Amino acid sequence: MVNAAIDNQSPEHVVIIGGGFGGLYAAQALGRASVQVTLIDKRNFHLFQPLLYQVATGGLSPGDIASPLRAVLKRQKNTQVLMGEVIDINPQDRLIKLQDGNTIEYDTLIVATGVSHHYFGNDQWAEKAPGLKTIEDALEMRRRILSAFEVAEKEADSDQRRAWLTFVIVGGGPTGVELAGALAELAHSTLKQDFRHIDTAETKIILLEGMDRVLPPYPPQLSAEAQAELEHLGVQVQTKTLVTNIDEDQVTIKSGDRTEQITAKTILWAAGMKASPIGEVMAKVTEATCDRAGRVIVNPDLTVPGHTNIFVIGDLANFPHQYDDGKPLPGVAPVAMQEGQYVANLIQKRLKGETLPQFHYTDYGSLAVIGRNAAVVNLGFVKFSGFLAWLTWIFVHIFFLIEFDNKIIVMVQWAWGYFTRNRGTRLITNPEE
Amino acid sequence: MVNAAIDNQSPEHVVIIGGGFGGLYAAQALGRASVQVTLIDKRNFHLFQPLLYQVATGGLSPGDIASPLRAVLKRQKNTQVLMGEVIDINPQDRLIKLQDGNTIEYDTLIVATGVSHHYFGNDQWAEKAPGLKTIEDALEMRRRILSAFEVAEKEADSDQRRAWLTFVIVGGGPTGVELAGALAELAHSTLKQDFRHIDTAETKIILLEGMDRVLPPYPPQLSAEAQAELEHLGVQVQTKTLVTNIDEDQVTIKSGDRTEQITAKTILWAAGMKASPIGEVMAKVTEATCDRAGRVIVNPDLTVPGHTNIFVIGDLANFPHQYDDGKPLPGVAPVAMQEGQYVANLIQKRLKGETLPQFHYTDYGSLAVIGRNAAVVNLGFVKFSGFLAWLTWIFVHIFFLIEFDNKIIVMVQWAWGYFTRNRGTRLITNPEE
């Protein structure tokens, strides 16, 4: 068993699984509480996922959007960080089990392991159309995108060349929209002078969305503006379009009754969402019910039914109590942050014998960027798009980067990139064998 | 065959294999020449290898020390870049063959594919003691170094914990010295507050060198100062020590008649050097002789014996004509840069029917960094160490970074790191399966 004792004065041991927005904000909010905190993550860093698409398109380095968890929490003397993968939970004995055989006792458990993408039962598509959840995913996308141009440059056959210069992005949510915008800029501006035998301006970028508009959770007016901006950048947007098959170099799509084939060498996946494996464990060892995506349906105070000392927060939680129609809170960073802070607060109240009203998410708005100078912002009371939205987007994203050195580096990269249209980290690493 | 024609006005086609210091400086020096230039590299970027140890120790990101070759050369309208691996050369037909099946015709060929590390006939050591030549090597070293601390933190057995906190670096040349200094800073300063169950100040860093002093090519006084600086940082330096075996967790060393075992979980290789595979091809298809490391012994004008239109430059070349004792020029960046520029100059002179005197390397000095605030500098007429040497080292390294945005980012990272002792990019990526 891993020794959890850091400070013998505070016997209450809070274990947090997952160092994403939910887990990290909970850990930070417990920094001055009279509890001992153990934060466990598979990785040794917190990842700022909203900027992962920038790594995939060569605008930022992995180090720019990741912060070592130990560095973030090193001054919190009541907190330890453990790198490890949790494979089982035993609520009776208040124990969790790690992949490496270690076990850890807890008094209170916060589960914040998030979600990953999935392929609606077509897992064989994963190899052909990689998704974007981890640093490794982003580097793999970057490798495929940049390699496609390299191969096209050497390709003599014009059909083949066209296939290498066609990119299909599946999913018109924020990730798909941001990816499409960045890819369009890469092809149409950054790489313009880089090749001698191909014209990267001929690159075709197709964004597919199943619903009737991109950014479905946003107000229709912003969706329309986002689509207009994308088309202005040269992205071909196809809504009400479903992917029915992905084959070697071929995407089959269905739009109403019409079936069509798109020939493309590079297909990027920005759709689907599935709970991390711990969701299944939770369903097995507690009385929790999971939704279709495997997310745990939580109580109004974010506990798991039947277990007042186990919380689920962030993307892994389905919180259906805020809206009258039972729609769960969206899987975005601000929800996870607020849930983390709420749970940390509740734990401290309970130690004093007090309680808290149920969790309530305060929606400060949502935003998505479409490319250089363009974004859409929805603050509820005001919606806007264009350059001002873009500045807002930049400001918010730099502000929420965890470490101060990341803020500086990303600011410098963006300022530089803005004037030069350069994307300096377009390296092809980990080449295929 | 790949279409080499960019500009039909200048029929002379110069093909450069390798985008390191030699190849890239040759290409840049041919930018305004009336020739067509094709630069071929396996990778799509130029790598600033002297700073690779910073990536391995979490101080810089890969993108900070690499520049896309196409970006560097995009304004040179007579130049094309091809990503590909050259596997054969046919001097009779003036053809080179790529791994992907393409062939390319040349009039003049510049071979600059460099060297990689090797294990003196003990290739089985490679997996246990990785070397440092590529971005992937550096990320693998970073993974091993950071993971060792993570495992030690969870380890209950004190002998095992000590093995995880022992690092052996084989080779006391510039790479070994810089790696040892950076590792000492990481363990003794950066990570000091990060762990709860281990004291990273107890980390043991052992630097092994076969010769009688570190930095053997430098004047003895600087070697002594470098060793003193390393010991001040807590590195244990063992000279006149050979590695005779590397086993699971165990390095066997021989010092005079004494044989000893060091138990260490992390062993890093900074010794040995072997020509890239193209050296062997050259020996087969030309009349060239190779030295024991496989480097091609070149003529005084850097051509290959028997072939006035084939040059070998950089680390792959053995140039024995400058010193009376026949000692070849050292395998360092300034030699490669000057050779590249000389060959570019000679090619242009020849086109005008002129000649050039034989190549002569101008040695502006050498330098190595030992850690924060300390370095050694040898400018020939003056040798110095300490803080001023460190500033010189920083200035030179930023100055020679190829792209301006890299210069800015690295400067910001270093300025920030200097005041905070932080190493922000200490991410464990590509975890072992």
Image (tube, coloured by chain):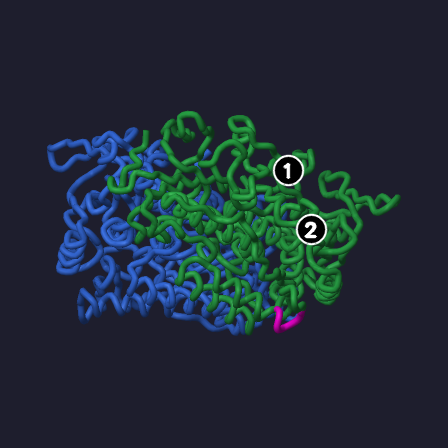
Chain colours: A blue, B green
Discs 2, 1: same chain: yes
Residue at 23% across, 57% down: A370
* Residue assigned mark 2: B169
Q: Quadrant of the N terminus of chain B?
A: top left
- Answer left or right for A303 relative to A417: right
Q: Residues within 10 Å of mark 2 (few under 14, many from 20)?
A: many
- Answer left or right for B46 relative to A91: left
* Residue assigned mark 1: B293
Residue B344 against residue A369 in the figure, above or below:
above
Secondary structure of the residue carrying numbered label 2: strand
Q: Chain of mark 1?
A: B
Q: Nearer the viewer, residue B391 or B192?
A: B391
x then y, percent, for residue B143: 57, 49
Q: Nearer the viewer, residue B362 or A358?
A: B362
Secondary structure of the residue carrying numbered label 1: loop
Is label 2 in contact with label 1 (beta carbons under 8 Å)? no
Q: Determine if residue B117 is in view.
A: yes
Which mark identifies residue B164? none
Furthest residue toward left? A257
- Amino acid carrying label 1: it is Ala
Q: Would you say residue B387 sits in the magenta stretch?
A: yes
Q: Quadrant of the C terminus of chain B?
A: top right
- Amino acid carrying label 2: it is Ile
x then y, percent, for residue B123: 65, 34
Q: Would you say residue B226 sits in the magenta stretch?
A: no
Q: Residues within 10 Å of mark 1 (few under 14, many from 20)?
A: some
Residue at 41% across, 70% down: A356
Magenta span: B384-389
Furthest residue toward right? B257
